[in-house]
């Protein structure tokens, strides 16, 4: 599924040393809606993940789904789904709408707290 691809960090960071990632993550913490030059913001990734979730929700209703992706997308996905769980009182009735409802800077800027949890299997909703 194309929407689960790795985050594009832009020409200044893409395919460079992992030592460059802290620069992107500092930018995410400051403003998760700001794109690194030519790359994707945390919000951009959250938007395509919401699209992927909507597609999976329609195609695999009632099924357990294993999502396999890359570090940043999985961290961002876990961040927004964790917020969705805490935001239970939502009037939204589909997962994609719930994800869109919690995409705010104070939530998206915290995606690095899930950095060491992306290799775990767990139920997300």
Image (cartoon, rainbow, N blue to C red):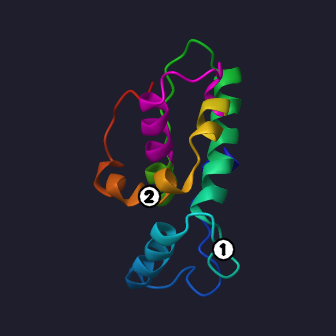
Residue 92 covered by magenta stretch: yes
Residue lying at 62% horizontally and 64% vertically, measured from the top left: 33
Residue 33 seen in the figure? yes
- Left or right of 10 on screen, residue 86: left
Give the camera-side residue of 38 and 33.
Answer: 33
Q: Residues within 10 Å of mark 2 (few under 14, many from 20)?
A: some
Residue lying at 50% horizontally and 45% vertically, measured from the top left: 77
The answer to whether the residue labelled 2 contacts the one labelled 1, judged by CB atoms less than 8 Å apart, is: no
Q: Nearer the viewer, mark 2 or mark 1?
A: 1
Residue 45 covered by magenta stretch: no
Which residues fall within the magenta stretch?
A: 77-96
Residue 45's image quarter? bottom right
Provide residue 5's location: percent of width, then percent of height. 61, 55
- Left or right of 26 on screen, residue 73: right
Q: Is residue 111 above or below residue 31?
A: above
Q: Dot 1: what SS?
A: loop
Marks 2/1: CA–CA distance: 16 Å
Q: Dot 2: what SS?
A: helix
The quarter of the image holding the N terminus is top right
Residue 5 seen in the figure? no
Residue lying at 68% horizontally and 31% vertically, measured from the top left: 54
Provide residue 121's location: percent of width, then percent of height. 33, 35
Label 2: which residue?
A: 71
Provide residue 83's location: percent of width, then percent of height. 46, 38
Label 1: which residue?
A: 39
Provide residue 14's location: percent of width, then percent of height. 57, 79
**In terms of sequence position, does the residue under pointer 2 or pointer 1 come before the other?**
1
Seen from this angle, which residue lies furthest top? 62
Residue lying at 45% horizontally and 71% vertically, measured from the top left: 25
Give the camera-side residue of 32 and 46.
Answer: 32
Q: Is residue 1 above or below residue 91?
A: below
């Amino acid at each position: 599924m194309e929407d689960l691809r790795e985050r594009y960090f832009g020409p200044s960071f893409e395919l460079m040393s992992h030592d460059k990632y802290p620069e992107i993550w500092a930018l995410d913490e400051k403003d998760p809606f700001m794109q690194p030059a030519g790359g994707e913001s945390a919000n951009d990734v959250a938007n395509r993940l919401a699209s992927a979730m909507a597609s999976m929700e329609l195609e695999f209703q009632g099924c357990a789904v294993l999502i396999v992706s890359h570090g940043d997308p999985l961290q961002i996905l876990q961040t927004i789904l964790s917020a969705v769980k805490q935001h239970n009182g939502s009037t939204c009735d589909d997962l994609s709408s719930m994800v869109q409802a919690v995409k705010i800077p104070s939530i998206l800027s915290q995606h690095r707290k899930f950095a060491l949890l992306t290799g775990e299997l767990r139920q997300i909703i």
